[in-house]
Image (tube, coloured by chain):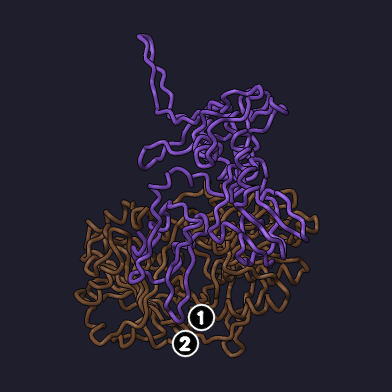
Chain colours: A purple, B brown
Amino acid sequence: MATLKINGKKIIAPEGATILEAARKHEMQIPTLCSNEALKPYGACRLCIVEVSKNGRTTIETSCTYPAEEGIEVKTDSVRVMEGRKLIVELYLARCPNVKIIRELAEEYGVKESAPQMGKDNDYCILCGLCVRACNEVVKAGAIQFAGSGINKIVDSPFHKTAEDCIACGSCAFICPTGIIKKNDLPATSVCTPESCTSTGAQREILNWQVEHKLKVCTKCGNPYAPEPHLQKITRQYNFLPEFFNICASCRQYPVVDEEKCLGCGGCMENCPIGALELEDRGGYDKKAHVFTENCTACHTCEDYCPTRAIS
Amino acid sequence: MVYDLAIVGAGPGGLHAAKWANKKGLKVAVIEKRKDISKITRYCSEHIILDEDYNGDTIKVDTAAGKIISTKNGWEVNYAGEFCPVTDKYYYSPKQYAVHFAWPDGRPFAYKYGKGTLLKGLLEECLALGVTYITETTAYDATDSPSGVELKCVSKAKKFKIQAKKLIIADGASAQLALKLGRNNERAYFGFALVLAVYMSNVETYKPSDWKGWWGRCYGTNLAPLMGTGPEGHFDLADFIILGSPKEPPEKTFEFFTQKGPMAFMFKNAKIEAKHCCLTKAFSPIKNPAKGNTIIIGDAAAFVETQAQGALSCGFRAADAIAKELDGKSSFEEYNQWWLKAFEFNDAGMLRVVSGYALIPTYTDDEIDYLFSLCHGHALEGSWSQYKSPKMMWDLILKDPEKIQRERPEVWEKINAKVTRTLSDSISK
């Protein structure tokens, strides 16, 4: 626990929190481009700068990496901070003049003209690293990385070839603030010539990493819903049954126990292939089956094994 | 942490194996799904069967000392609960001709006991010996690992793994782990039966020492309704057992039998005290239950059931086999040989004998009346065994074949056509 002041307001921040976290918890706005709750602080975009006064000295710091220390005083919108942010936006505008989110920031901070361009005109990647970090930290696929340095720094697949470790989950495209990662879900197609027809199932392509993967088709509704390698990875990671992903999330209907009919014999529990059922003991003969939906694969095996037809 | 032996299932087989393996100095972990095993939720008829050489053993019961004693395998289990002797068994036809099984001197051929009490005692013994008991946990998969066996477990949606050198699977008739290990591939699946058991008070003609069954379409079902002794502590209640299938739900049969059937008079003042149910799967038995690092014991490897006494013998033998294996002496083959010899269901001929119970609808009610009338008035020797009883019954029916040929040629034809119905026809898949 640490007590600090942000914009003159006394705030108690939990252990290990950063200034950004403490401020946002109290609904104080600090703009960011490279921060995400699911990822470790990175400090790349510099937009979150604030003024920190500590022991009589005042410095400009990135609030996403600076810990909310005891006794410090923080200003999120002082003149120095606003001027600094404006400069950063000018630099972004010089690099990525056509990216929507940058243009919006420019408007917000009254930036009319960009800084002089330095060899990079009209780029779309702001090098925030969200895609790389999501791929490594959350998905744990490690399919993409930064390559090059200085003005040649880019995000890329290894050796600018097909990213072999990519599972086409699409997290990179989802998290990218500029929308430069191109992920397309292609419907099933068949190409027919007078000689023969070749059909390809539904696929997902991510153009940036030169990846193309089959989409798994739900056995119930028949709709393609997620790339196969992605589902395989989750199946391995969480010990799911191989059949778990045969049905898509919207078709997954978890069994419901009719407590009036349930006599608590445990037939469902004994036959559940994944141990997702157990008996709730309510004293005496009163026992009812209970489904843990966290594990349940909605295979409905239990339904078949209920002597009183209490599960559906 | 690597256990010497992991046991899945804390039933009579699993706990008995745990007890003896621990006594042989092994580090044992028992994994059980339920919270409290002393409360039996899955319906069980709970009998100790005294038939000679039944399930490869002759069991003696010392009611005064509270002991169940195996005379052939050499184990003894303490039991702190009550026993109720079962002395008479009747199979009734529609017109109340009865096939009667009893010993002339009136001694029991089975004892009703309390499985919960038995398990509670066994568990307490195991815990006192220092067996690790992991409760409310399902072992849902097993794979070979460098240390022997790796068990994948789940408890309240949390997953973890348990390592052990050897594994005993005692997860009962649903045989889930055997399925995961691919050991059910070699087995024939006959189907399953739904069982509804109703404990009732004030049932007329009910005697705690009787076991009754009613054969005939007029009773509302192809699978004979049965009436036995109530649960331990309530031997005054009748335990009414109905088998069925999804198409012939046991609740419906129960309603018909107690309200409209020929025996409805028994239930005029009867009151339902409690209901239980279960689902029984029938597989053909596993021929080599001990294989690799694993022994599958008890019901998990059996045709329908080994009964508690069979499971106790399995646990006892399996603990011995595992201890020897860990000592470097190969003994799994010995266990397999014992398994094949001890249990009647491993004999294909015996399975055919069991289908001798499937009288309906091969025979009409009138024909069953005739067949049972041939037995009426004779007392067959006291036997519980589901293998020995139908054989004795048919032997008595066929004592005078010429008489049947003369009196009822059409019945004789059916008998000669052998029982063509198989078990799978009687129960649902």
**How far across and down, in percent of the image, does residue B217 sit?**
24, 65
Task: Using the image, name the chain to which the residue with label 2 belongs.
Answer: B
**How far across and down, in percent of the image, does residue A142 sit?**
65, 37
Closer to the camera, B193 or A15?
A15
Q: Which label belongs to residue B209?
A: none
Closer to the camera, B238 or A262?
A262
Q: Quadrant of the C terminus of chain A?
A: bottom left
**How far across and down, in percent of the image, does residue B254 sit?**
28, 72
User: Outermost residue, right direction?
Assistant: B327
Q: Are marks 1 and 2 in contact (CB under 8 Å)?
A: yes
Residue at x 44%, y 76% (from the top left corner) = B381
Q: CA distance from mark 1 to mark 2?
A: 8 Å
Q: Which residue is mark 2?
A: B233
Residue at x 40%, y 59% (from the top left corner) = A305
Instruction: Tell me: residue B8, above or below residue A280.
Output: above
**In this orientation, does residue B399 appear?**
no
